[in-house]
Amino acid sequence: MSDRVSGRPGRRHVAGRLALVLGLVATVAGPAAPLAGAAEGLTVTTPFPAVVVEAGDTASFRLSVDVAVARRVDLRATGVPSGWTARFRGGGLVVDGAFVGPDDPPEITLDVEVPDDAPADSSTITVEAASGALSDRLPLTIRVAETVAGSVSLASDFPELRGPSDTTFTFNVTLSNDTAAEAAFAMDATGPAGWTVTARPAGQAQATSTTVAAGGTGSITVTAEAPTGVAAGTFPIAVTVSGGGETASLDLQVVITGTYTLVVSTPDQVLSTTANAGSTRSFQLTITNTGTAPVTALTPSASTPTGWEVTFDPETIASLEPGATQTVTAQITPTGDAIAGDYDVTMTASGAEANDSVTVRVRVETPQFWWIVGIVLIGATFTGLYWVFRTYGRR
């Protein structure tokens, strides 16, 4: 007898009702929750799973280990070619594993050292991460190339500087590392015999090397000082850096325009004179250019005691050639109430390129007129005394 005849619902009808009930339950309860195993998943990734290096370099992979629940994760690298070395690093240590939290993943790096004799070929190394029943695998591809594109270069904003010999010449040099790997670069700078030349990383007074990231740049400061008395001319400065198997050089030059020095003195080398209070005294100075280039716009001046006056003839000197001497007359006038004694007057010659000064001692004396007046007064006094004694002495 069929189900329909017997009055009992058929199997298909029962199955349909069951599906309808399950559908209503699913609608009320929302999407099904993930399985417990998925919630405790483990993944290991890297942003750049395929890199290119040269033989003798190190390939570094920054690994990201993610978990849903904090746990210890063990790491190992498989498929490492013979002669190659693979190390996991974290926290400044070589590690075989790490304790990983879902909100605080550690920084882990896999460094693969490629030997110098590695052939130009591709190799695959697999990172295996395991924690209990959970595990993940990450294939990494390393291609060894004969020459990785890129180079190391040096450049300066101003490759030529000019000035007098007593100048410290400073060059700002940029080191560009266009290779595929970070490298530490040693630097050196040389100049002509007798010159003092240094090359340092910018802002570092003692360091002689700098580390530059792949594709990055670094700043180098090169200073050059000429020896005393160097003649005018052009002088080469050579800068060299080496690191990461690469070498770069840069040619700089310094143009010495000359040596600017002055000497202020007197024709007879005597740096003293006398003057009367309120009277003008002439005093001669010599200004000599002992340098190797002209000194221009020379102006003599004086620093005196309060109230004194000093004028010069000539007042200015347009230019003084190397080895030349110019005589200048100073008119020194002490104040009228100057007390007899020694006074210092500083004479200075200032030019656009150099200056010098000398101190002259001026002895202020009582004017001769007052000496005569004094003698007359003394004589009058004795004459008066003589007359008094002669007139009243007999009484």
Image: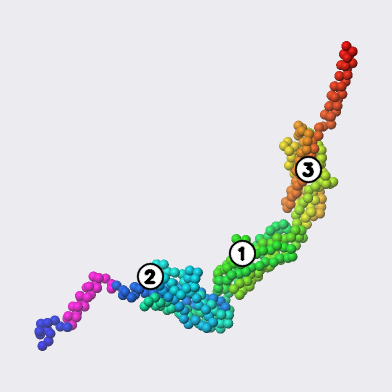
Whole-angstrom CA distance, mark 1 to mark 2, is 43 Å
Residue drawn where x is 73% and y is 42% of the image: 303
User: Which of the marked residues, 1 or 2, is nearer the chain's N terminus?
Assistant: 2
From where the camera sits, is residue 335 visible? yes
Q: Which mark is residue 207?
A: 1
In the rendered image, residue 21 lying in the magenta stretch gets the answer: yes
In the rendered image, residue 294 lying in the magenta stretch gets the answer: no
202 or 28: which is nearer to us?
202
Q: Which residues are magenta?
A: 12-32
Quarter of the figure with residue 76: bottom left
Whole-angstrom CA distance, mark 2 to mark 3, is 88 Å
Residue drawn where x is 48% and y is 69% of the image: 91
Mark 2 lies on residue: 70
The quadrant of the picture occupied by the N terminus is bottom left
Amino acid type for the residue under numbered disc 2: Ala
User: Which of the marked residues, 2 or 3, is nearer the chain's N terminus?
Assistant: 2
Residue 357 percent across, percent down from the top left = 75, 47
Looking at the image, residue 394 sits to the left or right of residue 198; the answer is right
Label 3: element kind: strand
233 or 305: which is nearer to us?
305
User: Which of the marked residues, 3 or 1, is nearer the chain's N terminus?
Assistant: 1
The quadrant of the picture occupied by the C terminus is top right
As displayed, is residue 374 above or below residue 19?
A: above
Mark 3 lies on residue: 360
Amino acid type for the residue under numbered disc 3: Val
Amino acid type for the residue under numbered disc 1: Ala
Looking at the image, residue 9 sits to the left or right of residue 318; the answer is left
Q: Residues within 10 Å of mark 3 (few under 14, many from 20)?
A: some
Which-is-in-front pick, marks 1 and 2?
A: 2
